[in-house]
């Protein structure tokens, strides 16, 4: 039995944020979603990533040649064909994101052709995945910060929330105090500097963060600086953990970070690191290194693979993406008691793109 891929198409949507957003090293007022659609055996599978709209052209014009005619029931084989096709245009960044969206779409169509949820097809290690609320942008005032963080704890039952730091050193202690007041003493507070600091600056912030019982320090220094991450991890006392990995595009990126001993918890983003195929391989690497894995952003795309991944700690319920996924996809997950779970009665990812609702955001 096989199911040749009849058609691969892509489109792009630019969705304004609900308020200006910023972190330690970037600011934005809109987010672009690139959607890949794969047709095989009379079914359509979808996958998406958050990247520049030009990835849609890369998918429809370049990668379609490698994918069309291949067997949708053999996603690792199609993944290998895509890796071959991109050799001379680079494996990272935009290309990895395009490949990730396609791979996720192929797994979706395969599960649909088998009439099962993707988590069922992959084999579940768990039925629900804890989430942590993520936002707390440096562009927010204290009232916005309080409302958002408290909402995740009180409304969604999250046991953990994450805020951005590192934009203005002087403001961070006050902002962490505001966050701690907003979430009470039970929920865990995470911080993310998005690589804004150097090792000494990170050490200084680590000391201040202990006053607010911060449990997770993400990208204290640039993720390119593995030695710097190792230094920061060395002076970070339990229970605070160091995490990084959101820019991993290949298995080697994950392996090098793990082998360096750079993190307490490895992060990976299914929509950047090579889709379902490579996310599960990254999860296996984490298991081999006795290190937990946390999924970065795009919760609706991660959910089913996260149910199958060993040592999966939690998924990031990123404000921007959770909002877009609820707006544009029927079947998008909804938090319940601090976790999300797949609807196993819906085949594939269980997601249907609301094309009509998305039309006004279309940019490619
Ligand atoms: Mg981050």
Image: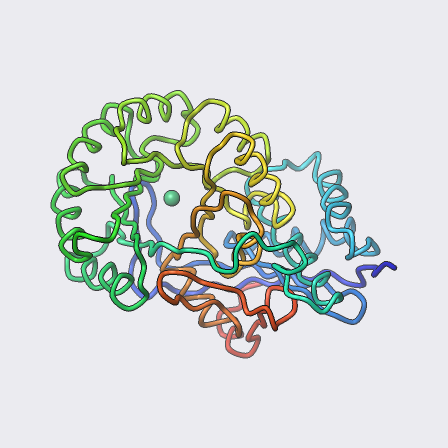
- Give the residue drawn at x 28%, y 24%: 199
Q: Quadrant of ligand 1?
A: top left
Whole-percent x, y for residue 37 in the image: 67, 63
- Colouring scheme, one of rainbow, by chain, secondary structure, one colour: rainbow
Tell which residue pokes out farthest to the right in this image.
1
Residue 293: x and y in percent read 47, 41
Q: Is residue 290 above or below residue 186?
A: above
Report which quarter residue 11 is drawn in: bottom right
Locate the C terminus and report the quarter of the image it occupies.
bottom right
Q: Position of residue 76 (x, y in %)?
A: 73, 46
Q: Is residue 328 above or below residue 77?
A: below
Total numbered labels? 0
The residue lying toward the viewer, choosing from 105 and 169, is 105
Tell me: 337 left or right of 187. Answer: right
Q: Is residue 233 above or below residue 240?
A: above
Q: Nearer the viewer, residue 314 or 31?
A: 314
Q: Residue at x 35, y 54 (%)?
A: 132
Q: Nearer the viewer, residue 205 or 137?
A: 205
Q: Residue at x 52, y 26 (%)?
A: 256
x, y percentage for residue 254? Answer: 53, 33
């Amino acid at each position: 039995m096989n199911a040749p891929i009849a058609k691969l198409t892509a489109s792009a949507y630019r969705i304004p944020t609900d308020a200006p957003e910023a972190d330690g090293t970037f600011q934005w007022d809109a987010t672009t979603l690139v959607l890949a659609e794969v047709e095989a055996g009379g079914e359509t599978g979808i996958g998406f990533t958050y990247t520049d709209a030009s990835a849609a052209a890369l998918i429809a014009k370049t990668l379609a040649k490698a994918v069309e005619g291949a067997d949708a029931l053999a996603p690792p084989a199609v993944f290998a064909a895509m890796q071959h096709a991109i050799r001379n245009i680079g494996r990272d960044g935009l290309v990895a994101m395009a490949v990730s969206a396609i791979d996720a779409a192929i797994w979706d169509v395969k599960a649909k052709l088998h009439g099962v949820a993707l988590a069922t097809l992959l084999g579940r290690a768990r039925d629900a995945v804890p989430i942590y609320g993520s936002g707390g942008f440096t562009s927010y005032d204290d009232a916005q910060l309080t409302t958002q963080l408290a909402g995740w704890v009180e409304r969604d039952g999250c046991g953990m929330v994450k805020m951005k730091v590192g934009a203005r050193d002087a403001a961070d202690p006050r902002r962490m105090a505001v966050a701690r007041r907003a979430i009470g003493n039970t929920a865990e507070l995470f911080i993310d500097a998005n690589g804004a600091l150097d090792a000494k600056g990170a050490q200084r912030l680590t000391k201040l963060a202990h006053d607010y019982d911060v449990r997770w320090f993400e990208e204290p220094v640039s993720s390119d600086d593995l030695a710097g991450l190792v230094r920061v991890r060395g002076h970070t006392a339990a229970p605070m953990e160091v995490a990084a990995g959101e820019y991993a595009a290949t298995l080697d990126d994950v392996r090098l970070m793990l082998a360096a001993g750079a993190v307490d918890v490895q992060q990976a983003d299914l929509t950047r690191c090579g889709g379902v195929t490579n996310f599960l391989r990254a999860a296996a690497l984490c298991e081999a290194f006795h290190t937990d894995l946390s999924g970065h952003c795009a919760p609706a795309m991660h959910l089913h693979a996260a149910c199958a991944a060993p040592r999966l700690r939690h998924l990031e319920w990123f404000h921007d993406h959770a909002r877009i996924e609820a707006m544009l996809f029927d079947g998008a997950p909804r938090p319940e008691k601090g976790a999300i779970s797949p609807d196993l009665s819906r085949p594939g990812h269980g997601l249907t793109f609301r094309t009509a609702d998305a039309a006004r955001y279309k940019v490619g």
